[in-house]
Amino acid sequence: MEKMYKDIVEGALEAILFADRHGKIRLWNRGAEKMFGYQKKEAIGQSLDLIIPEKFRRRHWDGYFNVMETGETRFHDDLMTVPAVRKDGKPISLEFSINMIRDAQHHVIGIAAVIRDVTERWNKEKLKKG
């Protein structure tokens, strides 16, 4: 069963990642490699700052650590669209959902995210709005 899950995660076109309570990347699939330009060995163990534009980091971390502490988020079952940055410095727009991962005592130990690059769609919508 574990191999099946690994094959599903690794074969997904979407980026799938897991970050621990401290915001360190612990899982990074092939979709994430393609989307962000970092190989798995470059991303694992790094901070999520790797893909968060500098001007949004403080707000991100305030929210992230609040979720880790309280176990609650208003974004749990919603898709969010946020800015991100690739290894080459190119800005991209992401649509993603998160799931809090809990231990046996129900403490949040991190988040899993399924991420889609919506840069092209986002840019078209911005042009329409004028």
Image (cartoon, rainbow, N blue to C red):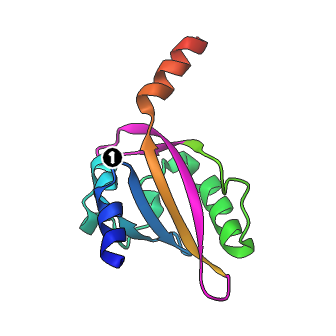
Q: Residue at x 30, y 75 (%)?
A: 3
Q: Main secondary structure of the magenta part?
A: strand
User: In the rendered structure, which segment of residues is drawn in magenta?
Assistant: 82-106
Q: Residue at x 32, y 70 (%)?
A: 4
In this rendering, the answer to whether 65 lies above or below 106 is above
Q: Amino acid at mark 1?
A: Met
Q: Is residue 40 left or right of residue 122?
A: left
Please state the horizontal and vertical placement of residue 71, each as a whole percent of the image. Answer: 71, 71
- Residue 120 % position (x, y): 41, 27
Residue 103 in the magenta stretch? The answer is yes
> Residue 101's quadrant in the figure?
bottom right
Q: Is residue 56 left or right of residue 45?
A: right
* x, y percent for residue 1: 36, 77
On-image quarter of the C terminus? top right
Indicate the secondary structure of the residue bearing disc 1: helix
Identify the residue under disc 1: 35
